[in-house]
Image: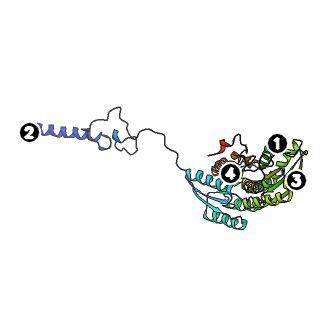
Amino acid sequence: MKKLFAFVLSTAMLFSLLTGCGGGGASSSQPAPSSSAPQSEASGGSEAAPASSAPEESTPEAAPAGGTIGVCIYKFDDAFMTTYRNALQKILEDKGYTVTVVDGNNDQAKQNEQINTFITQGVDALIINPVMTSAAATIIDTVKTADIPTVLINREPTADEMAAYDKLVYVGCDAAQSGTFQGELILETANKGDINGDGKVSYIMIQGDPENIDAKLRTEYSVKALTDAGMEVEQLNLTRGDWDREKGQTICANDLAQFGDQIEVVFCNNDDMAVGALQSIQSAGRKVNEDIYLVGVDALDAALNEVKAGNMTGTVLNDANGQAAKAVECMEGLLAGDTYAAGSQSVYVDYVKVTPANVADFMG
């Protein structure tokens, strides 16, 4: 009996010892995993996951950027800025940002309040299309005090104003280039704009808001392109049209009534005013590209249709989509810690001349 008891006791001790060597209390009777099955190496002695639950190897998708962005537009009913803000909002939302876009109603005091509200709400970054370029210094001081990364668009402050804050960048186009391209569109016509052959180009200028640097430079450089090419010019009239189609129509109608056939070229600082001017040209019985030339800037759909139909001499693409993409790119750089040294805070997207020969490339 004693021998039998000793045998049972030793067997029990041996079983206990073997059980104690198992990881995490696994039964010695559980089959060992196949050498080809993936095994977990989780800490704490946890049991290896079954092969069926192991995730497949894959490259994880990047998480949305996140964050809140405030966008201030000088006024919603500007045709070009409508295209711009829609592109901007889509790009930001597609990247996972929470976006609020507000209408300044062409009122700088209102926009200042909107900027302050965004700051109070704690947005991560601001994208601002100033109502007035002259308000840039105040805007920059406000965002600098709040330490908010900021991208200014469409209306460019001076380099000295921007130098006050290194978390600020301007994204836009070189307005001088757009004016130069307008002048080149006229120079590329058969008679270089001198329709009546009197040795000079007689023109009217329908200007945007002269407080806006774009209006100033387009006005200056469109004519400079002609004089640089050796053409004599005669300004019959220059009138402020505030980027507005109805004002463009009224101004052109008045000038046609006053100057008649003397007008050889109608320069418009943007397409909306050019489309308005076209209505008056047609009502006066004039024919674009035959007895008068007409150019604009922006390459709005309405203008592209008229260029294609031969009712505008040409326009200049102001690339809203390209600028929106670049503005978001710069904003994300600022959020990642980028700063801009004085003198390098303007980022430009090129304009493109649009004529009947290439207009199809920009339609649809």
104 or 308, nearer to the observer = 308
Q: How is the image coloured?
A: rainbow
Secondary element at tag 2: loop
Mark closer to the chain start, 1 or 2 = 2
Give the quadrant of residue 242. Answer: bottom right
Disc 4 target residue:
300
Residue beneath the point at 30% across and 40% down: 22
Residue 48 visible here: no
Q: Residues within 10 Å of mark 4 (few under 14, many from 20)?
A: many
Identified by mark 3, the residue type is Gln
Q: Residues within 10 Å of mark 3 (few under 14, many from 20)?
A: few
Q: Position of residue 49 (x, y in %)?
A: 35, 42
The label number, if any, that marks residue 187 in the structure image? 1
Looking at this rendering, what residue extends furthest in the top direction?
Answer: 35
Q: Are marks 3 and 2 in contact (CB under 8 Å)?
A: no
Mark closer to the chain start, 2 or 4 = 2
Mark closer to the chain start, 3 or 2 = 2
Disc nearest the viewer among 3 and 2: 3
Mark closer to the chain start, 1 or 4 = 1
Q: Are marks 4 and 3 in contact (CB under 8 Å)?
A: no
In the displayed structure, would residue 114 be above or below residue 217?
A: below
Mark closer to the chain start, 3 or 1 = 1
Q: Are marks 1 and 2 in contact (CB under 8 Å)?
A: no
Disc nearest the viewer among 1 and 2: 1
Residue beneath the point at 78% across and 52% down: 286
Disc 2 target residue:
1
Secondary element at tag 3: strand
Q: Is residue 128 left or right of residue 28?
A: right
Q: Is residue 25 left or right of residue 280?
A: left
User: What separation in Å lies between label 1 and label 4 (alpha carbons)?
Assistant: 22 Å
Identified by mark 2, the residue type is Met
Disc 3 target residue:
235
